[in-house]
Image: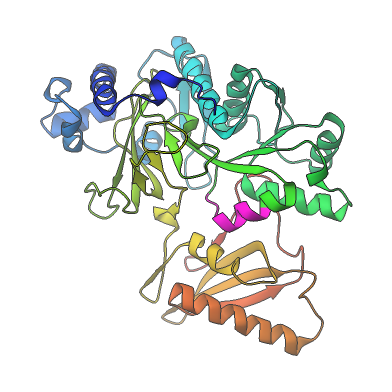
Amino acid sequence: MRIWDERMETLSGEELEELQVERLRRTLERVWGARTAYRSRMEEAGLSPDRVAGIQDLAELPFSEKQDFRDGYPLGMLAVPLGEVLRLHASSGTTGTRTIVGYTAGDLQVWAELVARLATAAGVTPSDVAQIALSYGLFTGGFGLHYGLERIGATVIPASGGNTELQLSLIGELGPTVLVSTPTYALHLTEAARDRGIDLRAGGLRLGLFGAEPWSEGIRERIEADMGILATDNYGLSEVLGPGVAGECEFKDGMHIAEDHFIAEVIDPATGKPLGEGKPGELVLTTLTREAVPVVRFRTGDLTTMTRERCRCGRKNARMSRVLGRVDDMLIIRGVNVYPSQVERALLQVEGVEPHYLIVVDRRGELDTLEVWVEVSESVFSDDTRLMKEFERTVESHLKTALNVRAIVRLKEPKALERSVGKARRVVDRRDI
């Protein structure tokens, strides 16, 4: 099994901590010198870079968060002059003001290296042909994966997002061996291929690099079966770097974190206190080599667990589980916490249910209601109302057991729900409408 950067991916615990401390000090000095809002926060806490002697002092440092980028919009988070910035990317802004991030020449080089690292872990080699079905533009996904795959030496097809007819045509004509997309778009491609009588398993595809949204093991199994590939997960976010923070190896047993470039913590999202290994909480990241936009203890809003148990692949860095959901995605329905990922896992355990669903939250009088709109397969869908009502009750019963709260199920005929070419929209909350 190939390792892209064997030295850094197999550092001993002592060597890693020594490197992290050295790089953390440089990061704090960079943030301090930039006079960003984070410096003010440190001063209020009576802290300065020279007060941090080791990793154990990290918990004393204040958090940073997405709102810092919004407060400093557009370029208030830059720690270097704009003349040193080679590229600007931005988030979509779907949950508020978009966040702008910059990259120096050094940042872009590190980014390509880290994506090369995660792609190599997934099994990509210089002889592979990778079709990137992620959007190119302000979104970091397309460009991030592109340059990392080229760094390996793989041939890249920059198909960009959407245009399913073109995607299928390129798969048939150019024979890519690697598909890069969101997991929901991979599902859409398999469905579109099936409708056109195309068997994706008969082509050259062997690997899938999927990220940018939470997805369940059930979705992975569907994609792998329909495409005949090994499907791996990877993680990143624009405020920290983009894709390249972590990625699964071929054993698919958690995503290896690039700990020589990021310090990862898992905290209780309510109290901010660090949690022990294996306990689910909010991922917090500190950049160690970022030049243009260094961040310290950045609250990602993503829920995960971490382990330091050694992986069979030989890499020694910590691993994070797939993203379980987002802190702000948690729905409280009649006092019960519900995450979309829980709904997805429960639905996929019911035979005859397709992996296309929408969660609709509403309020009737003083009570919140939870509806789940879900497509059924061709083999189950029927014009017989009685049969459909019986199946609805079956799904409702399964969800009640899994979620510990009642959900009203609305069955939809095949292909009734909107398909996503980017990040899937899973929740519609009508309570504030």
Q: Which of 76 and 180 is in front in this view?
A: 180
Q: Give residue 347's position: percent from left, percent from top.
A: 59, 68
Report the magenta stretch's main SS: helix
Q: What stretch is highlighted in magenta?
A: 214-222
Left/right placement of residue 159 relative to residue 101 reads: right
x 51%, y 22%: residue: 4
Q: Give residue 221's position: percent from left, percent from top.
A: 63, 54
Extreme residue toward the right, this view: 197
Q: Which of 416 and 382 is in front in this view?
A: 382
Q: In this view, does 413 lie above or below 110?
A: below
Extreme residue toward the top, this view: 83
Q: Give residue 405's position: percent from left, percent from top.
A: 45, 78
Q: Give residue 262's position: percent from left, percent from top.
A: 36, 29
Is there any visible trace of residue 292 in the rendered image?
no
Q: In this view, does 108 lie above or below 196?
A: above
x 64%, y 42%: residue: 230
